[in-house]
Image (cartoon, coloured by chain):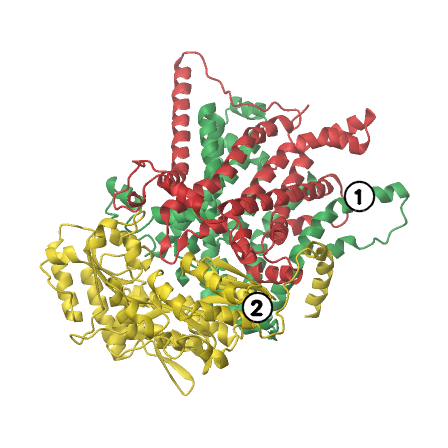
Amino acid sequence: MIIPRAAQGVQVSRTKSATGAISFAGLWHRSRQLLFDALGLAIAALMLFPIYWMVATAFKPGREILTLTPTWFPSPITLQNFQDAIARPFFLDDVRNSLTIVGVMLVLALAVGFLAAVGAARFGFRGRTTYLVMIIGVQMVPLNALIIPLYLTLDNVGLVDALPGVIAVYLAAVLPFMIWTLRGFVANIPLELEESAMIDGSSRFGAFWRITFPLVAPGLVATAIFSCIQAWNEYIIAYVLLSSPSNQTITVWLASFTTNHGPQWGPLMAGATITGLPVVVFFLLLQRYLVGGLTAGSVKG
Amino acid sequence: MATAIATPELEPAPTRIQQRSRLLPYALIAPGIAVIGGILAVPLAWLVWISFQHYGLKELINHQGEWVGLNNYRTILADPLFHQVLFRSLLFTFACVALTVALSTLIAMLLQRVRRLVRVTLMSALVFVWATPVIVSVDIWQWMFDYEFGVINYVLTQLHLGNFIHHNWFDNPLQGWSVVMVIVVWGAIPFVTITLFAGLLQVPADIVDAAHVDGAGPWQRFWHVTAPMLKPLFLIVICLSTIWDFGVFNQPYVLLNERPSADYFTIAIYSYRESFGVTQYGLGAAIAVLMVLILIVVTLFYVRETVRVAEIA
Amino acid sequence: MNLRKTWLGVIGVGVALLAAACGGNSSSGNNNNPANETGTLTIWLMNGSAPQSVVDGVNADFKAKYPNVTVNVELQQWGDIGTKLDTAFAGSAPPDVVELGNTLVAKYAAAGALEDISGKKSSFDNSSTWLQSLTDSCTVNGKLYCVPYYAGSRAIIYRTDLFAAAGITAPPTSMDQLLADGQKLMTANSSDPNFSALYFPGKYWYAALPFVWDFGGDIATQSGGKWQGTLNSSSSQQGLTTLANLVSKLSRADKTGDEAKQDAAFAQGHIAMIIANGWEVGVITDPKAGNPALATKLGAFPIPSHNAGQQAPVFLGGSDLGVAAKSAHRDLANAWIQTFTDQKNMSQMATVGGVIPNTTSLLGLGQGLNAVFYNAAKNSKFVPNSENWANVENANVIPDMLVKIFTGQQAIPDATAAASTKITSILNGGG
């Protein structure tokens, strides 16, 4: 996601741009600032509208949902849709499955991806170009085209309708992106930092662990968030690979709100709100760390 | 792929230490290659293998196809529908990527200039969009663009932009594809914007200020100072967006009730339809293989540049 | 294949350790006493096809007979079900029993996915009185590949209060009268820009077929092993012309949309008639998402024929239950289907599930409005029974044709000719 440009020895934060004294220029600055702020809020509102519509719908009573004249605010507010959604069988099972799949996948992906990224960023070796091209190339294969062979392969080793099978597929799907992105982060940390630590008596590994690793942490967070969203939201692979309802993921559970006569909008929107929540919380918790860490981490004189 | 890298080198025997550090990078990348290769190599080989066979449902169930050489490829390449779909997919990808990158760059630059509170609000909005599962967000969009219950038709009519009561957005494919584009770009903006914003934060302020002092306008400052510094970022973002937008599946598929007419095929939908719709898995596989080949050609420049920049770094 | 085998071997060793934990199912005891049978049956039913209470009842009955057999009923989702079925049948352990939409059976049967149960037909209750259209859907090349499960047939659901307000005293009994009554309704409600006398979404091909059939037309006919699309025959065109006229005068529904939203739309109160399944009454009057106040204002009547006093043949939708050819417990699977489709449980499907049971002997169970739909099932037809029919459906041939006709993009002769050519080609195994 973030491939920071090497920018050694430079002051970064320029967000507090000049707000001058009271003068013509100051007035111009201030009204321009106002314009920017208004624009920023307008874009936020536009982007958010579909999400708002989902959440608002989740709180609307059934008959208020499909109306020819839309109601902008749920009134009266009802929790019925949430109750209906949660009461649907296997909710907790499927939440647990999704958490397991994403959690295990993330730990493995971060470990493997980080090693591979270090290998590609810190060393020149024969075949590196091939390796880098392969990392990008693998991402071009449409996952939908691999449904059958993935199923047959996992069937051969008895991993159909089992979480490890899905974890393996997701792992292979997110790793290329993760390796590529982390490689950018590692490459961005000046080697001199490690070398100076080694001069101070650290082993190469020690220097790497104490100096480079903390600086790459934001990168790990960023890629973790991205992979987490990818895996948490995937549908078709999970649906095809997992058959028993108690083994399925939360997105497959969500699909059960769509029957042969269209979606049940209220419970579906409530379910989607509940499903999206963990990802948003995860992201918001780490967001400051992500951007903040980036600015602090990538530049040290 | 993996074997090419692991081939022993025919060079004078290195010393122990040299050998260790020469093997170290391979040791580091080995687990990654093992995982990706171990899981994807067989399915990929199967896909290519099947693309040379007549492979229907019966063959699938019995795991026994009939070798037909390049026939599937000939059929596809001679099919006018394939050319249509390919042309449309390329155009659509180009438009989406251009729009995504342009809008995201503008929003990222705006993020730098707004108050903290506004920035947090906008960032959170982006995060919310990003975190919403595609299958859910497409449902919401479909409903917002609905013929009779759609909030968009209602709002456009209320704003006196025309009579949109009972307006069908998918009647006219050009209009329908514009809707698809809005949804795809909407979904792509958060990732690209946040990436570019993080990159922008690292563009040294003094260089930009110096350009300002030298009398460069905002456009020149961006074009001659900021953009070149963000080049690696732009490269990878364009590269990934192209890959993703060329492979767009869910948006048109769900918007058109999982039964899109040929007017709304992307290459990915076309391949999926041939495979699971009409159980011609060989043809479907051939389309998928062609899709990857075309993607390689389309992104060749970007991949080369991206890798070149990465090699320097 | 060798390349694949080698690779599989390599991968297999690596992952086998992980897989070791997952044991296989035990096999059936080779004995005729059901109490000695053991094993695990996996059953795929579609989301919403049978009420949970009915399924529980079936499993209890089955358990009483086969105390040592475990039954896992797994509900599948509608979205991408074809993909899931294709992959599952390709795998080594597909579900033992699978519910298939009746238009899908031929495809899977012809490919060898389903067990030929011709010899066991008489072991199922009511097999001599199964609904003809459902039996047809299970029969491929003269062999039986599945057991009819339930059916759905369409009739017209209407608002009695709106009819009364427009001065219509009795439901129409001919297509002409349907049009005339519809126009009365349109006039009576002319102040409502959202009003539809007969709400007909453009892609609703199940509801379009009765018009084709009523004039003697059909989708395709078979002679000498070859299929010939016949939507462009003069009788088919006559039916479609009648329908197009109704749609243009009576419907404000989306001409390119499908019928998924029609119940929700009906519940909003701007519609006088829809062509619908019996169970859709329940969706319309659902206390949460629908409008329960309409419950007392609903009526139903069969789609009238163009011959006054008769009714048009309708499409018989529904599902069948098949046994996977690769199943390790085919006898147990058949035994489970026997239990599910026995007299008692089929009656439950009708009374609790509200669907049309698989046999004519139970059609008397239709009460109230349901009786209309049950009756419609007696005069029903089916799509061409070809293994390639699913491909016609998946290529959207008929919906696309209807959209072109209703939106006026193509004249009826051109649109039907194009569709017929395509149907002929696909049914005969072409692309």
x then y, percent, for residue C276? 28, 62
Q: Chain drawn green, letter?
A: B
Colour of chain C in the image: yellow
C205 displayed left or right of B206: left
Q: Which residue is depicted at the point 29% across and 43% down?
A: A64
Q: Which residue is depicted at the point 46% across and 30% down?
A: B110
Badge 2 amino acid? Ala
Q: Extreme bottom residue here?
A: C224
Badge 1 amino acid? Leu
| Chain letter, disc 2 residue | C
B119 displayed left or right of C153: right
| Chain letter, disc 1 residue | B
Q: Extreme left residue here?
A: C167
Q: Chain drawn red, letter?
A: A
A283 displayed left or right of C424: right
Front residue of A104 and B23: A104
Q: Which residue is depicted at the point 40% across and 58% down?
A: C51
The residue labelled by disc 1 is B24
The residue labelled by disc 2 is C35
